Amino acid sequence: MNSEIDVLVLGGAGVDTIVYVPELPLPYADSHLVPSIEARAGQTGDFVALGVHALGLRTHHLDMLGADHHGDLVRALHRDRGIALTEVPQPAGTKRAVNLVGPDGRRLSLYDGTRGHEDDRLPPETVRALASVSRHVHVSITQPCAHALPLLREMGVTLSTDLHNWDGTQPYQEQFAYEADIVFVSTTALADPERTMRQIAGRGRAEVVVATAGAEGAYQLCDGELTHIPPVTPSAPVVDSNGAGDAFAAGYLYGRLTGEPPGRCGLFGAVAGAYACTVPATGADVISREELLGAATP
């Protein structure tokens, strides 16, 4: 197959309104004075696309967008960063969320669940055309990406996904967990991360399962062996954890697609994730290939 795209990203395009708050949880009050409130393009698929593109991989993003101001922000982000974007009309409007960010960089995301309908679909012919010239597809867990999974599996392209804060039981995420070759998940809501990781590998197709654990680093299950990916000390103060998991996935996928062994892929992910925590989410900045390789050099 002649590949024109290294990473095709499905879904996860949208706009976050970032609010920096004095503490989390935010105590009840009639009002709070905050430093700033800023809406910017960039949800999980956007950040993965930004990340792998900045690392030099040929990137294409496919999702549904509304004919609205929020959609214009997403379109402008991709245009300004030089990332190819194929959009499908979203009658309910562009996906959006409000993210509250505390002084320590932790965030609370309030996701608008009205920006989609159960009958939304990415056109199969569009998915097929893009996937047929792609080396790899990263599938966001946003609606309507699950409906594209059977077609992608039929085509034989390798898949990755990020289950985010899955608790290991919710059925919606299972369809992604058991169809992907590379699965990322946060340990945040997992009672027993190793058990869930082995469940994903045992029931699904995953060759690699990576569970990110914030400041504790991450854990990687590969060929039945569970290993720890040590945390990387950020090069600057931690100000915002928005996009850290997406950055980890982008760094890991860069290693995977450039032929690096699992341990080094994990290091790339840790370096990229740590970098993401040092920049305000309002800027949507991501690590460059030079910075990544420099930080990953022994």
Image: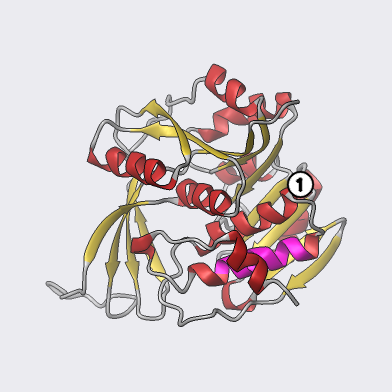
- Residue at the spot 59% in from the left edge and 81% down from the top edge: 233
Q: Image check: 200 left or right of 40? A: right
Quadrant placement of the C terminus: bottom right
- Of all residues, the one furthest to the top in this rendering is 125
Q: Is residue 161 magenta?
A: no
Q: Is residue 268 magenta?
A: yes
Instruction: Tell me which corner region of the image, top left, top right, bottom left or bottom right, holds residue 86.
Output: top left
Q: Nearer the viewer, residue 254 or 194?
A: 254
Q: Nearer the viewer, residue 45 or 133?
A: 133
Question: Counting other residues with Cα less than 10 Å from the Cα at mark 1, is it few (<14), some (14-19), or many (20 or more)?
Answer: many
Q: Position of residue 100 (x, y in %)?
A: 32, 67
Q: Position of residue 113 (x, y in %)?
A: 35, 44
Q: Position of residue 112 (x, y in %)?
A: 32, 47
- Residue at the spot 70% in from the left edge and 76% down from the top edge: 230
The amino acid beneath tag 1 is: Ala
Quadrant placement of the N terminus: top right
Secondary structure character of the magenta stretch overall: helix
Instruction: Tell me which corner region of the image, top left, top right, bottom left or bottom right, holds residue 218.
Output: bottom right
Q: Nearer the viewer, residue 8 or 37?
A: 8
Q: Is residue 217 above or below residue 281?
A: below
Q: Is residue 58 above or below residue 281?
A: above
The residue labelled by disc 1 is 206
Q: Image check: 132 left or right of 116? A: right
- Whether residue 263 is visible here, answered yes or no, is yes
Q: Is residue 88 above or below residue 138?
A: above
Q: Image check: 9 left or right of 46? A: right
- Whether residue 143 is visible here, answered yes or no, is no
- Residue at the spot 49% in from the left edge and 39% down from the top edge: 11
Residue range corresponding to the magenta coloring: 264-273
Q: What element does badge 1 sit on?
A: loop
Q: Position of residue 224 (x, y in %)?
A: 87, 58
